[in-house]
Image (spheres, coloured by chain):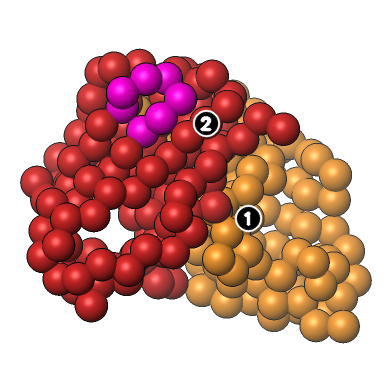
Chain colours: A red, B orange
Amino acid sequence: DAMVIQNPRYQVTQFGKPVTLSCSQTLNHNVMYWYQQKSSQAPKLLFHYYDKDFNNEADTPDNFQSRRPNTSFCFLDIRSPGLGDAAMYLCATSSSVHTGEKLFFGSGTQLSVL
Amino acid sequence: GESVGLHLPTLSVQEGDNSIINCAYSNSASDYFIWYKQESGKGPQFIIDIRSNMDKRQGQRVTVLLNKTVKHLSLQIAATQPGDSAVYFCAENRGQAGTALIFGKGTTLSVSS
C-alpha cells in the first residue's frame, strides 16, 4: 500500500545533541511537510517542501532544518535539541500545494530529550 | 445526542448517540476545510473535507457543516461507536496557493459502551 513512513517510531536524544528524523513516501507526492505536535496540542506546521523548494514558517526556530534529497525522502534535523523540543514530529505529503489537497500523515516520531 | 455549542476540549457520549464536534476558524479567506481523527500514538487520519462553496457534505456516518458567516465548522458522527474514540481536529487551508493546512484545537471524544 502507498504510504508515508516515519523512522524511528521513538527517538531519544540528549540535550544539545543533534538528531535527525526520517520520512519516506511511496505516494510520489510533490509536497512533503513537517509538523510538530506537543502533548494535547494541535499539530503545528514547521515547514514544507514543494519539490525542491523549501518553505519555512515564519515562527519556526532556526534550530530546525530540513533536507529533501529526492522525491521520496525528507529529513528533519534538530541541531541542538532543547527540553522544549520534546514532541511528536509528524511528516505528511500532498500531491500539490493548491487548495483542496488532502494531507496524508505518517505515524509520527516521538522525540524525547534527556 | 450530545452536542457542544462552543469548542470544548472533551466530549463524552454513550455508544449509539450522535456526536457533534465544533470548530471555529480564523481566516475568512480559508476556502478548504478538513476533519482529521487522531488515535493515541498515531498520525492524523482523514475523515471528511469540504470546500467553501458548500455548506454541507456527508460521508459514511459523518456530516460536516460549514457556516462561513460565523466562521464555524462542525462534524456530526451518527451512531457513535467505541472505535470513534479519538482526538478530532479541524484544519483549514489559508486560502492562498502554496500554503499548507493549519490545525485548530482538538476535541477528545470518549465513547462509552
Above or below A112: residue A50: above
Above or below B37: residue A2: above
Residue B105 visible? The answer is: no
Q: Residue at x 79, y 66 (%)?
A: B83
Q: Is residue B88 left or right of residue A64?
A: right
Q: Is B110 inside the magenta-drawn segment?
A: no
Magenta segment's dominant SS is loop
Residue A76 picture quarter: top left
Give the chain letter at badge 2: A
Q: Residue at x 80, y 40 (%)?
A: B59
Q: Is A73 inside the magenta-drawn segment?
A: yes
For the residue pair A71 and B10, the one nearer the viewer reads as A71
Q: Is residue A93 left or right of residue B63?
A: left
Q: Amino acid at mark 1?
A: Lys
Q: Residue at x 52, y 31 (%)?
A: A25
Helix, strand or loop at label 1? It is strand
For the residue pair B90 and B54, the one nearer the viewer reads as B90
What range is drawn magenta here?
A: A68-74
Q: Which mark is residue A25?
A: 2
x, y (%) of residue A74?
Answer: 36, 33
Q: Is residue A14 left or right of residue A90?
A: left
For the residue pair B9 and A78, the one nearer the viewer reads as A78
**What residue would you read off at disc 1?**
B37
